Image: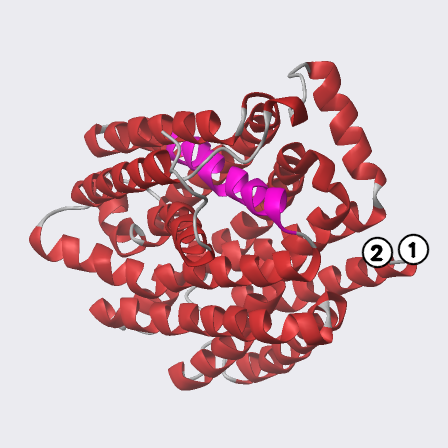
Amino acid sequence: MKPTKPLSLPEFVTMLAIMISILALSIDAILPALGQIGIDFELADPNDAQLVLSAMFLGFAIGQIAAGPLSDCYGRKPIIYLGYVIFISGCILSMAATDYSFMLFGRMLQGLGAAAPRIVSIALVRDGYEGREMARIMSIVMAIFILVPAIAPAIGQGVLLFSDWRSIFTLLLVMALIAFLWFALRQPETLEKEERREFSLKNIASGIHETLQYRIVTGYTVASGIIFGAFLGYLNSAQQIFQTTYQTGELFALYFGAAALAIGVASIYNSKVVIRLGLRFMTQRALVALTIISFVFLVIVSMNNGVPSLWSFMMWLLAAFFCIGILFGNFSAMAMEPIGHMAGLGAAVVGSVSTFISIPLGWVIGAQFNNTVIPLVLGFALLSSMSLIVVWWTERGSDT
């Protein structure tokens, strides 16, 4: 049911942040359990446990393609409802799986379902805001979204102290129900019937074609996917780096959370200065800094046989993630700016394409784990420089 008055901005931002954060919680709360999952399913290669993450991102990438266009046709709320139903089904399947393939299928369903609240939430923001104000709101939402990983591994680790990894999925199910009820009872529909687009393959193809005609949309979508590929490579290998290479044990959640906080702090900082300095200024400076510090640290890593001291690795990680925190919200805002008239489909194209780009890049980085941090740091150095090149190409052809 609709509320009697529109949501206040603080409640709107908080609700969106919680809805979006379920995706982050689904990813990061399971990280401490990857080793045990590999043992329970008797995986021959420990790196294969990383597929628990990749399967979810695959479902997420596929789900965005449908969620955006469907929300443009039927409205934002019904599609988010459907997404929660699919997500909850995936939680139940993963929780009950006795075969690794079924476990991965459940994870893919979770990603498929999480795509609706994640991607349609961006359309909700775009329905009411644009330009730098949209970037400010997205930065705040993304800050909370990124702050969740600061505590998610600790939550997962806490669950493992009293139960097994299956109970983590029970927690995710409960969180999804809470978010579902809040959204259903408080958030009004933001897309009026007269503004909706007819759902058809022809309209979808036409919308995708129109979206990709914008150099800004295409360029920043590709640049975002490349950077997210580096971040996904970190997610894939973080548990092994901290618990295998650096032997941090249960302190893994602490180190992982500290890195996540750097992204959150950067997102908050970006929300405060982006209106004054501009999207492009902040984005380009962050990319240049990320490229330089990654190549410099790669030299240090090579001089230490691939395993520098933990404190130096954390210093690099904090600096790199501060840059990424600036990039995440700005990339989305710039890619969406020219396509407000079809925000649902536009968000689907931007999110799906960037995720499809990131999955193989992140998988390659994670699969190269060899008890050193060389694959991760090298991946960051190369991908940040590639993203910077794409941004430069994009801006060369832009008159905005």
Q: Is residue 262 left or right of residue 65?
A: left
10 Å crowding of disc 1: few (<14), some (14-19), many (20+): few
Q: Position of residue 63 (x, y in %)?
A: 52, 30
Task: Please say whether residue 119 is one of the residues in the magenta stretch.
Answer: yes
Checking the image for residue 397, the label placed there is 1
Secondary element under disc 1, as helix, strand or loop, is: loop
Q: Is residue 188 left or right of residue 84?
A: right
**Coloring basis for residues:** secondary structure
At x 27% / y 56%, what residue is drawn? Answer: 32
Residue numbers of the magenta segment? 108-129
Checking the image for residue 394, the label placed there is 2
Q: Amino acid at mark 2?
A: Thr
Q: Quadrant of the N terminus?
A: top left
Corner quadrant of residue 85: top left
Q: Position of residue 217 (x, y in %)?
A: 76, 46
Q: Amino acid at mark 1?
A: Gly
Vertical arrangement, residue 355 with respect to residue 315, above or below: above
Q: Is residue 396 left or right of residue 221?
A: right
Q: Residue furthest front?
A: 4
Q: Position of residue 386 (x, y in %)?
A: 74, 61
At x 65% / y 32%, what residue is drawn? Answer: 345
Checking the image for residue 387, the label placed there is none
